[in-house]
Image: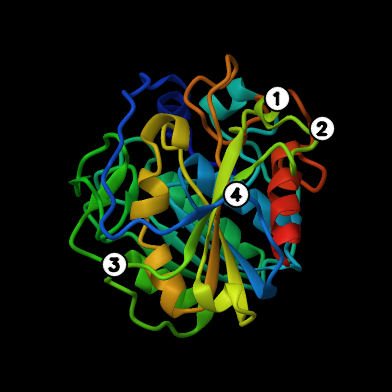
Amino acid sequence: MIRPVSRLLAAAVAALLLAPVAPAHAAGTPYTKVPVSGSLSTYRVSGVYVAGVSSGAYLANQIQVAYSQRIRGAALFAAGPYYCAQNNVAQALYGCGDNIYPTNLSAPVYVFHGGSDRTVKRSVSDDLVRYQQHFGATVQYDSGSAAGHGWVTPYGTVGCTATAAPYLNDCGTDPQQTFLRKLFGSVQPPNTGPLGGTLVRFSQHTFAVGGWANGLSMDANGFAYVPSSCASGATCRLLVALHGCLQGHSRVGTAFVDRANLNQYADTNATIVLYPQAVAVPSNPNGCWDWWGYLGATNYPIKGGAQVETVMNMVRRLGG
């Protein structure tokens, strides 16, 4: 059993649930826009990895645990341990319970926590590291950055220490290179010019449990970046990239898709990047992923959980 997370998590959950809704933001792209097509195809996929920030990191961890034999590695930014809330938001606000889902996580994991992050406290990310290590993961913990609460990327549009929309922080570093090297073993330099692949915008209803993505607090459309080599039949990896609260397409457009610094590495490292999209609903006004049970389901963090299975349906279609 893992020891309970500190009550400092109260501040983290309160910020995630109750933060004021930020205005929509449409950031420009750092490169020439790639062609956009309209449906997911199937490719030659050699392995599936997950990454995410904030609530997206919690969902990435849930997918990692639920499908531990399939997921080959995870990169988790600004988040805490698995199954913290145990279906009870009041409990999440005042301290997590013990983890009750032991599993085998014998895969590489990268965890990032910024020193200026006041949304998810350092102690909460420390518990995430301990959780992963307890169940067998080999963890690289990056806790030396001054970053605020967000996804750190060379294409960030806010300052390093800020916690502000679109939550893409420029700290003058490239953590994507670091975590992809951890997950893949080695990594080629990114494509810093115009991208050569295709950005696919597809209907999430097709993959949603029950056939209606909005009913799962998921947007009508999601995105996937497919490098030309993968489209031409090369064997490629698949990385699922999950945005955080207030960071989906309905709030910031394609800022996360364009600026996460993943498509640039995908082009040169034979990797398809899947970008599922959450959306706000009355029970989830900030468009977070479900890591505390807002959909009312008791199985949200395991196989059968509505968002977990919807994302995995996308993975299966892509060939994962």
Residue at image mark 4: 38
Residue 97: % across, % down: 64, 37
The reply to whether discs 4 and 3 touch (Cβ–Cβ < 8 Å) is no
The reply to whether discs 4 and 2 touch (Cβ–Cβ < 8 Å) is no
167 shown above or below 214: below
Residue 51: % across, % down: 52, 57
Residue shown at 57%/44% (left/top)?
222
Residue at image mark 2: 210
Residue in the foreground of this view, choosing between 196 and 150: 196
**Residue 215, disc:** 1
Secondary structure under the numbered disc 4 in the rendered image: loop
Q: Nearer the viewer, mark 4 or mark 2?
A: 4
Residue in the foreground of this view, choosing between 159 and 43: 43
Nearer the N terminus, badge 3 or badge 1? Answer: 3
Q: Is residue 293 left or right of residue 109?
A: right
Residue at image mark 3: 174
